[in-house]
Image (tube, rainbow, N blue to C red):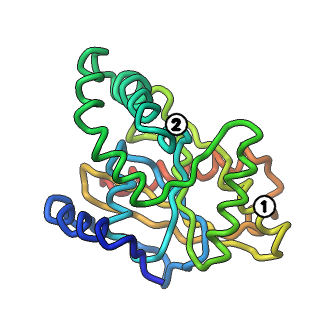
Amino acid sequence: MENKRKPFFEFVKKILRIFKRKPKVINENTELDKVAIYLSNHSAASGPLIYELYFSNAMRFWGTHEMCGTMREQWKYLSTTYYHNKKHLPRWLAVIVATIVLPFVHGFYKGVQILPTYTDGRLRSTLKQSFEVLNSGKCIFVFPENSSDGYHDELKEYFAGFYVLARQYYKKTGKNLKIYNMYYSRKKRTLKIAKATTYLDLVALNKTDKEIAEMMRVQANDMYHKICK
């Protein structure tokens, strides 16, 4: 199943490919499963855009719920959280930039049909929607890094939501999902995909959710250093 969106958004993607070149890919796998969980650093706004333009498998992204609401809610998130807190722009400049980019960002989120994520009990709705996506033959893309203080080349912390998803999906369906850990460097225009593991492989390690997330973070940073070499 190819990563096809609605006709107008596909047209927009063709235009964007003129300005965003396809990255070099270093893949340690012979093939990439269509029904799986893919992890990646965010690389600011570059990661999701590159995957949407050039990743061939049909997919849905996990994304913060603030960016899945009304345009006003999106503007508030962009001006306060993204551009001011994460990108460290002055408040006045963050407001201006957020206002300019809002129509484009709104269109992108609507076009790719982001699955909203939460840090409270509403995560159950994210899992339920994710199950439907996986059952339809698509993959789930998760950006697990903690970006509360901005985006870093060397990642500081990973959240374990992806592991919760794999566990709950296994409990519900008995299917042992593959998990692909990746790192994208916009500076080197390079994507590295580590050899896949599976949910049961991770269970066999007898680690906590937090320890599994930390293991994936360390592996991602190792990929970053290899790319830089």
Residue under label 2: 66
Question: In the picture shown, does residue 192 fall above or below 98?
Answer: below
Q: Residues within 10 Å of mark 2 (few under 14, many from 20)?
A: some
Q: Is residue 86 left or right of residue 69?
A: left
Q: In this view, does 194 lie to the left or right of 53?
A: right
**Residue 149 visible in the current orientation:** yes
Residue sitting at x 50%, y 54%:
114
Question: In the picture shown, does residue 77 fall above or below 128?
Answer: above
Instruction: Name the front one of labels 1 and 2.
Output: 2
Q: Which of marks 1 and 2 is nearer the N terminus?
A: 2
Q: Which mark is residue 13?
A: none
| Quarter that holds the C terminus | bottom left
Question: In the picture shown, does residue 149 fall above or below 190?
Answer: above
- The amino acid type found where label 2 is placed reads Glu
- The amino acid type found where label 1 is placed reads Arg
Closer to the camera in the image, 52 or 43: 52
Q: Residue 167 carries which label?
A: 1
Q: Where is residue 92 in the image (x, y as percent from the top left)?
A: 26, 15
Between marks 1 and 2, how big is the CA–CA gap? 26 Å
Residue sitting at x 74%, y 54%:
164
Q: How crowded is mark 1: few (under 14 residues within 10 Å), some or many (20 or more)?
A: some
Q: Quadrant of residue 100?
A: top left
Q: In this view, does 121 lie to the left or right of 82?
A: right
